Image (cartoon, rainbow, N blue to C red):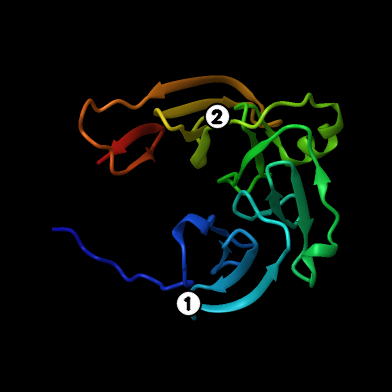
């Protein structure tokens, strides 16, 4: 029999289309909640109370993450700019924007407390520090019509890192698996699997990882 566990009402969401997601905070027991594309709130889970927050005039295009390497919070704006700030920052609008020539689809947390991965709309990847250092030498590209969702990095027992995400367009949904270089986090090879269920509507999907085995689950 299924057991329903305790849930937490972390933040009000007026429009789910504007909610960009939650992420692990620098402080154990806290989470980063990215609301309405320009509101970032740090919430203590046990008390469900806000401990910090930031707002900006510019719209975020990906949920905010905390980068353990730089000890900074990182947000992507309009797929082409990044801001990095610390917990003592009071005004995000005064934080310098770092411009990119490539379009950033998402930032992905490294599950073993490693550096953040930058995922571009082209499917290319690299570490945050490498992306910032090499941004001016990168070639330009057009904005993709697809969206990347449920992006995760899994570390296998042998140390290999696998990036998984779903690529959604108006016509289809595909599962993408990418083998990553453990140091640079660049994609070494990638595999795309189109999800097809005939006339049966797809209501939900995810990737589950257990002891080096990756399983696709759909409903």
In the image, residue 172 sits, relative to residue 27, either above or below, namely above
Crowd around label 2: few <14 · some 14–19 · many ≥20 (10 Å)? few
Left-right relation of 142 to 89: left
Residue drawn at x 39%, y 28% as measured from the top left:
172
Q: Label 1, on which residue?
A: 46
Q: 149 or 132, which is in the foreground?
A: 149
Gap in angstroms between the C-alphas marked 1 and 2: 34 Å
Q: Is residue 12 visible?
A: yes
State which quarter of the image contains the C terminus. Answer: top left
Q: 54 or 43, which is in the foreground?
A: 54
State which quarter of the image contains the N terminus. Answer: bottom left
* Residue 211 placement (x, y as % from top left): 39, 37
Crowd around label 1: few <14 · some 14–19 · many ≥20 (10 Å)? few
* Residue 218 placement (x, y as % from top left): 28, 38
Q: 65 or 158, which is in the foreground?
A: 65
Residue drawn at x 77%, y 55% as measured from the top left:
84
* Residue 182 placement (x, y as % from top left): 64, 31
Q: 121 or 190, which is in the foreground?
A: 121
């Amino acid at each position: 029999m299924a057991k329903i566990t305790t849930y937490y009402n972390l933040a009000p969401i007026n429009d789910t289309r504007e909610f960009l997601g939650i992420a692990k905070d620098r402080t154990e027991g806290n989470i980063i909640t990215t609301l309405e594309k320009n509101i970032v709130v740090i919430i203590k889970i046990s008390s469900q109370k806000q401990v910090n927050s930031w707002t900006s005039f510019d719209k975020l295009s990906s949920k905010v993450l905390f980068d353990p390497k730089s000890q900074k919070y990182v947000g992507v704006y309009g797929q082409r700019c990044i801001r990095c700030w610390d917990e003592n920052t009071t005004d995000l609008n005064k934080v310098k924007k770092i411009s990119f020539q490539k379009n950033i689809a998402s930032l992905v947390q490294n599950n073993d407390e490693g550096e953040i991965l930058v995922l571009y709309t082209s499917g290319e990847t690299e570490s945050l520090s490498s992306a910032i250092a090499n941004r001016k030498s990168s070639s330009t590209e057009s904005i993709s019509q697809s969206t990347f969702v449920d992006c995760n990095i899994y570390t296998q027992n042998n140390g290999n890192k696998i990036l998984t995400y779903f690529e959604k367009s108006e016509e289809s949904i595909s599962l993408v698996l990418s083998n990553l270089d453990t140091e640079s986090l660049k994609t070494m090879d990638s595999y795309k699997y189109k999800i097809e269920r005939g006339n049966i509507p797809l209501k939900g999907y995810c990737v589950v990882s257990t002891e080096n085995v990756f399983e696709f689950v759909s409903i």
